[in-house]
Amino acid sequence: MQRLTGFHAIEEYLRSAKGSARSRARVFVSSSGPRIKAILELSAELGVGVTRAAKAELDALAPDHRGIVLEADEAAREEPDLDTFLMEPPETSLVLVLDHIEDPQNLGAILRSADVFAADLVLAPRKRSAPLTDAAIKASAGAAAYAPLSLVPNLAEALRKLKKGGFWLYAADMGGASLPAADISRRAVLVLGNEGAGVSRLLRDECDFAVSIPMSGHVDSLNVSAAAAVLMYEFRRRFPA
């Protein structure tokens, strides 16, 4: 089971969860307020159980709660499958590949942008990357319930499958071609690297091109979640969803 504490995260889980997953969810509440009242009304509307609890009980469930905690089935989110996606991808497709992103806040922010810019698929490795924890879900402002995140065993193999399926692969790299001038395919894979090391050499070698975001300030790089948002925006500017 997972425990969610963010207001957005709880609301979007309740709205997106299906059937038995929703019926197994339960809201624990120790406080009141407009946002909590709205969640309780939504819970009643959807038939989700609510338990009144003492603050100490919620402290034990999730120390960073804000007066409400949702206990939910981790398996409720429907995870897309890469092979199924490649059977018939949209003519215009945006795929995001996260090369061992470690910070849950970054993962959550990227998933939020992926939902905003209608990414068709987000791939991340099953091991050695930030898990989809409450912190990541909270940072996504609830978008994690909708973002098409798929965890794969091998990112390099996933890139090879995407290339074989007609996608062009673009690594985000400071030495790459300037993004505004870069030729971007309608079926594009954007590869974003680890916070410290960037895109790994293994994945960079699989990519067809490298692209960079032009900058003119005093710092020499963007946070990976900010870079992801810029790259996805540019794709959707050229190819609206």
Image: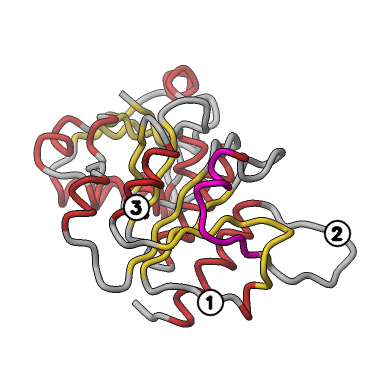
User: How many neighbours does mark 3 have within 10 angstroms: few (below 14), some (14-19), or many (20 or more)?
Assistant: many
Mark toward the start of the polypeptide (3 vs 1): 3
Image height check: is 164 above or below 193? below
Query: On the image, numbered disc 1 is attached to which residue?
Result: 183
Residue, x 46% and y 82% (percent of image)? 238
Residue nearest the observer in this picture, 211 or 28: 211
x%, y% of residue 228?
A: 56, 59
Q: Which of 133 and 84 is in front in this view?
A: 84
Q: Which of marks 3 and 2 is nearer the N terminus?
A: 3
Q: How far apart are marks 3 and 1 (CA)?
A: 18 Å
The picture quadrant where one finds residue 105 is top right
- Whether residue 236 is in magenta: the answer is no
| Quarter that holds the N terminus | top left
Question: Is residue 13 rendered to the left or right of residue 106?
Answer: left
Q: Name the residue beneath numbered marker 3.
A: 162
Would you call the spot at circle 1 few (<14 residues within 10 Å), some (14-19), or many (20 or more)? Answer: few
- The quarter holding residue 78 reads top left
Q: What is the quadrant of residue 225 in the picture?
A: bottom right
Vertical order, 63 against 184 (above or below): above
Which residues lie in the magenta part? Answer: 202-211
Tell me if 165 is positioned left or right of 156 in this view.
Answer: left
